[in-house]
Amino acid sequence: MQSLELFEATEQSQPQRLGPAAMVLRGVALPHVRELMPAIEVIEAMSPFRHMVTPGGFTMSVALTNCGALGWTTDRRGYRYTAVDPETGAPWPAMPEAFARLANEAAAVAGFDGFKPDACLINRYLPGSRLSLHQDRNERDYDAPIVSVSLGMRAVFLFGGHSRTDPAVKVSLHHGDVVVWGGADRLRYHGVMPLKDEPHALLGSQRINFTFRKAG
Ligand SMILES: O=C(O)CCC(=O)C(=O)O
């Protein structure tokens, strides 16, 4: 496993700029993977992954849970952040220190010093799961960046403009890659194309994404 991680880190070490304040940091999460994976199991045991329903009545193909002081949720009444998991009635699991550290370090590399996320949305994709183009607008202010960590199967990330119909670039995201966007790019549309079944050596036929935000 270690040799695979090293191989990927060496292969993909060049940051890729997606905009004036947006970039892909190749492989920067790889040194954290051993801490992140068991933490997911702890979080999942407290707040299980579930398929939420959008305000339009569609069931999301991505399963999600959260950790941190605030968690992102959706139902027929709308999108919002809550301090309590609506499924368990208990607060969302605390954000592990390793998660917050990774988000803070990645943000700093992309030029956003002092990022302290209070919300970590954890998305689990299986083959065929997708996330349609959207903006992240449920946060109280847009000063802080978004930090998005990819683990497991490869995904094609779509990074568009400020209008839904703007063309989107396709970015292949691999295990350990982190995308950071903020500032002038904070409200750009983004999404994920339907995942192909290309099993990953560590995670098998799934992809886990952490999306860190300062929500409250
Ligand atoms: O899975 C990803 O790479 C992106 C996730 C995302 O855009 C979101 O949760 O808002």
Image (cartoon, rainbow, N blue to C red):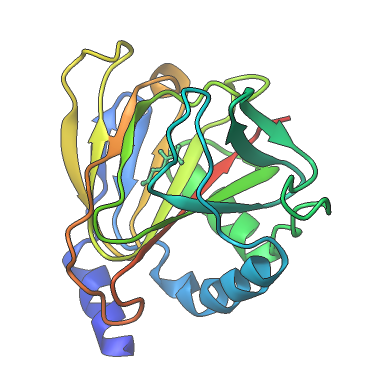
For image coordinates 65% across by 44% down, the residue present is 119
Q: Nearer the viewer, residue 140 or 103?
A: 140
Residue 22, percent across and down? 35, 32
Q: Is residue 204 above or below residue 214?
A: below
- In the drawing, does residue 81 fall left or right of residue 37? right
Q: Quadrant of the C terminus?
A: top right
- Please name the residue shown 70% across and 43% down the image: 118
Residue located 69% across and 64% down the image: 96
- The residue at 73%/41% (across/down) is 70
Q: Position of residue 16 (x, y in %)?
A: 23, 43
Decide if residue 135 is on the left or right side of residue 77.
left
Residue 18 lies left or right of residue 140; in this view the side is left
45 w.r.t. 156: above or below:
below
Task: Report the front residue among 65 and 99.
Answer: 65
Indicate the quadrant where residue 94 lies: bottom right
Instruction: Report which quarter residue 132 is drawn in.
Output: top left
Numbered-mark total: 0
Residue 141 vertical placement versus 82 (above, below): above
Q: Position of residue 185 (x, y in %)?
A: 38, 22
Left or right: 101 in relation to 51: right
Specify the quadrant that holds the N terminus: bottom left
What is the x, y in percent for residue 5? 30, 78
The quadrant where ligand 1 appears is: top left
